[in-house]
Amino acid sequence: MRPLLIFLLSMTLIFAQGNSPEKSAEVSQPALVDVSVKTTYEVYTNAEIFTGYPELLGRKYVLSNTKSTKGAFVSSDGIVLVDASVQEKNPENSRAPETLLDLMIKDAARVAHIKMFGIEPSDSEIDSFAIYLLDYYGGRESLVLKINSAYKEGKIIFVPTDSLTTTGSPEGNLMNATVIYSDSNVAVINTTVSDAPTLAFLNGSNVTNGDTGYLITYVEPDNPIITPVFIESSSSSDSGISFAVPPSSTIKDEYGKYFNLITDKTGNVIGVELGENGKNIIDSNELKALEKSANFEHKVSDTNAFFLEGIDSYEEGVYDKAEESFEKVLTLYPEHLQAKNYLNKTAEAEKKKNPLGSLKFENLSIPENWIFILVFGVALFYLVTKIFFRK
């Protein structure tokens, strides 16, 4: 019976998303997750970045670089899709050269101080000398370019020694994760999460070239921007879907920096934009292909179904049923912030609707029509006393 209930609720989720892009934004938001990949390097230098300091040649440094981006759960057993660039190990495309510069400039400052005064410098003296050397050698930007040039010439070698992938829950708790598949566009990550909220793709959408759709951009967690866009190809085509942002859009030049969903004109989710400038869109067909490549199976989210059921009950004013649904969500996925918010809103709405309806004296509940009963009781008491105690 339970599998049938979950199936029916899930089908309701998919079709109910079509109510509006706003509903899609709300239901899909809990599936978003922060993904970070921390790469540790051993760096060997044989380039004289600071002229006059040959002591730094042949030095070995150990540094780490962390790259973060937004991903999304696409299966309730914790499978996350994320742009492949998050696990970029090419130091030239990361902050590793800047981190190396910080280490090298302090090393040079220490050497300079010893040459000048013959003693080990304090931390504050190293910082002062480092500021002077940065300015003397042309500033940070110039030195980073010099490091990148030396890297291309093979005079600086970055050797990745370790990589740690983590996902951040809505409440900021870090969870270890494992990259189980990656290609040039997308990485598939397996987390320890169960009963996760997921993006609900609409299968077999009837999108055609020139249709109007919507771009849902999560600039702020609770304030997504919804922008009309033009769908440029069908999700059933070999090339997948693409879209064009109207020139008048305020998000036109910014959307590539954030996590985006693409919906059809009725608000059904038809794709997720992982890369910048709309170049890496995963639609339902590509998601199915990834399931085979990464050897995972999409599992329907019970959490989504109960969350949507709760929203519908809340909007209909059936607060006891809404409360029950949101509590089910939090039992399955305790860090579902949106369900927590709705649970608070439901309690407040219930209080306004029925100020004393929830008060109980032992096993006796005060009914909603207590005012009528009170007035009726007083009137009845008055009549009885008039009858039995009249002179």
Image: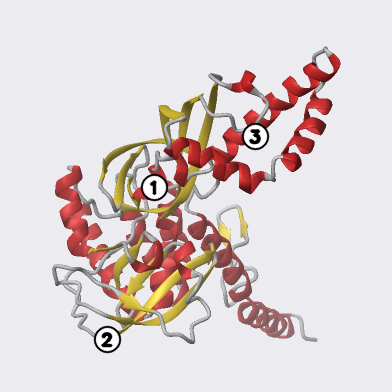
Alpha carbon distance from label 1 to label 3: 45 Å
The residue positioned farthest toward the top in the image shown: 118
The numbered dot on residue 350 is: none
Give the x, y percent position of residue 144: 58, 43
Residue 223 in the figure: left or right of residue 300? right
* SS state under label 3: helix
- Residue placed furthest toward the front: 52
What residue would you read off at disc 2? 211
The quarter of the picture where residue 367 lies is: bottom right
Q: How many residues crowd around disc 3 within 10 Å: few (fewer than 14), some, or many (20 or more)? A: some
Is residue 75 in sight in this rendering?
no
Viewport quadrant of the C terminus: bottom right
Residue holding disc 1:
332
Residue 248 in the image, given as x and y percentages of width and height: 49, 87
Q: CA distance from mark 3 to mark 2?
A: 51 Å
Picture layout, residue 351 above or below residue 214: above
Q: How is the image coloured?
A: secondary structure
Nearest the eye: 236 or 323: 236
Which element is circle 1 on? helix
Mark 1, other Cα within 10 Å: few <14 / some 14–19 / many ≥20: some
Residue 102 bears which disc, if any? 3
Left or right of 237 in this view: 283: right
Q: Nearer the viewer, residue 91 or 13?
A: 91
**SS for dot 2:** loop
Quadrant in the picture for the N terminus? bottom left
Which residue is depicted at the point 28% across and 50% down? 184
Q: Is residue 266 left or right of residue 131?
A: left
Q: Give percent across and percent down for residue 156.
A: 48, 30
